[in-house]
Amino acid sequence: RTIQDASKTVSRALRARTSSSLPIIISTSKEQQQHYKSIINNMSTTNIINSGAQTVGSTSILGRSTKPRYDYQTTYDSSVVSDKSQAKVVILFVVGTAMSCTGYAGLAANCVAGQSTMFVTVDNSPGSSVKLSGEKTAEAFNDIQANIKERLGDIVSPSATIFVGGHSAGGYSAIEAMQENGGDLSFKPAGYMGCDPLGRGAGVPGLKIECPTFAMGFTIQTCLVTLDQAGLAAYNITSNSNRVMMQIINLRNFGNQITHCIFASDGCPACPSHDAGAWVRDVIGKFSTLFVDSVVKGKEATKNQYEAATGDKASLVNVFYGAEPATV
């Protein structure tokens, strides 16, 4: 099956999971491992585990919320991460407009497969479709960072390297939360991973990113997202030399076009996650591995390595890197 099929299977399982206290374990048999092969990058022994949605804080009947108030879901590879081999990296990722923390199972799986990494999908404003608040994102991220053992468990190192990021409005909120933008984030993230982040007012171009950046964007506008206000901008505003952009060449495809919400397993009502773009999350996972390693190990990946990671989809991806500016 395609990644899209597998992602939908995971999403359905996660929705069913909400009434249970047990984690969902993917690929527990040889047959299931084969089924999930495309997501875990052909690693037949990998187990991808999702916690299901978890809630911090509460909202009263009058609509008033405690601080912090957020939902989150954790994803990790149990063949690498355990209480005896703690995750060395945490990726805190905020969901996009009208999305929930269970909507990015395929993306998360690709980013953790074979890695000492926990991917934490955060809904910074449960019950609201608006995810733009840098303040709420900072509250959620600070709470997780300060309470790693309680929130993420013994399988994550207390000194784990923390990356931040998100999709669309969530990706914008993660940038707005950074200290260089006057945000309330209590720590300096090791890196930023933005899936076509989109803001308000002056938007992404009006902000700064000082840490290493992995940005994602497109060549054709979809879902009313202006190209130079989103992923393109996140890459270009990054002052750190360790930056890379994966620009998806989303050619018009008669109703089956790759869109702004391809990062979510099922897309969104405005732009569904078509099968035509099922490969995108797989390539993102490979870029993510190169990017995270470049930060953690202190040796930047080369542009050639990123280009090689596109595999047989090289004709559908532009790679911008280092000092070169990103353009449409």
Image (cartoon, rainbow, N blue to C red):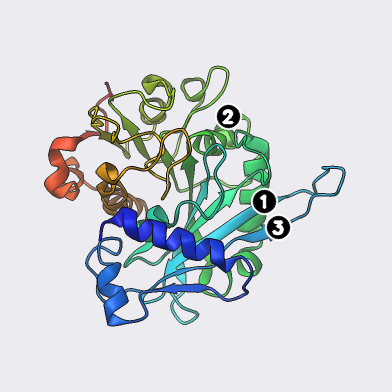
Q: Position of residue 138 (x, y in %)?
A: 64, 43
Distance Cα–Cα, label 3 vs label 1: 5 Å
Can the viewer see residue 152 in this picture? yes
Classify residue 194 as left or right of residue 94: left
Q: Position of residue 130 (x, y in %)?
A: 62, 34
- The kind of residue tagged 2 is Asn
Q: Earlier in the sequence, mark 3 or mark 2?
A: 3
**Mark 2, secondary structure of its residue:** helix
**Placement of 158 over or under 235, stated as above or below:** below
- The kind of residue tagged 1 is Tyr
Residue at (34, 32) in percent of width and height: 217
**Mark 3, secondary structure of its residue:** strand
Q: Nearer the viewer, residue 27 or 308?
A: 27
Question: Which image quarter: residue 289?
Answer: bottom left
Residue 40 is marked as none
Residue farthest along the right direction in this orientation: 62
Can the viewer see residue 185 in this picture? no
Residue that badge 1 annotates: 70
Q: How many marks?
A: 3
Q: Nearer the viewer, residue 118 or 73?
A: 73
Distance Cα–Cα, label 1 vs label 2: 22 Å
Residue that badge 3 annotates: 56
Residue at (28, 69) in percent of width and height: 35
Question: Which image quarter: residue 94?
Answer: top right
Distance Cα–Cα, label 3 vs label 2: 26 Å
Residue that badge 2 annotates: 181
Question: Which image quarter: residue 133?
Answer: top right
Residue at (60, 48) in percent of width and height: 123
Of tags 1 and 2, which is closer to the observer?
Answer: 1
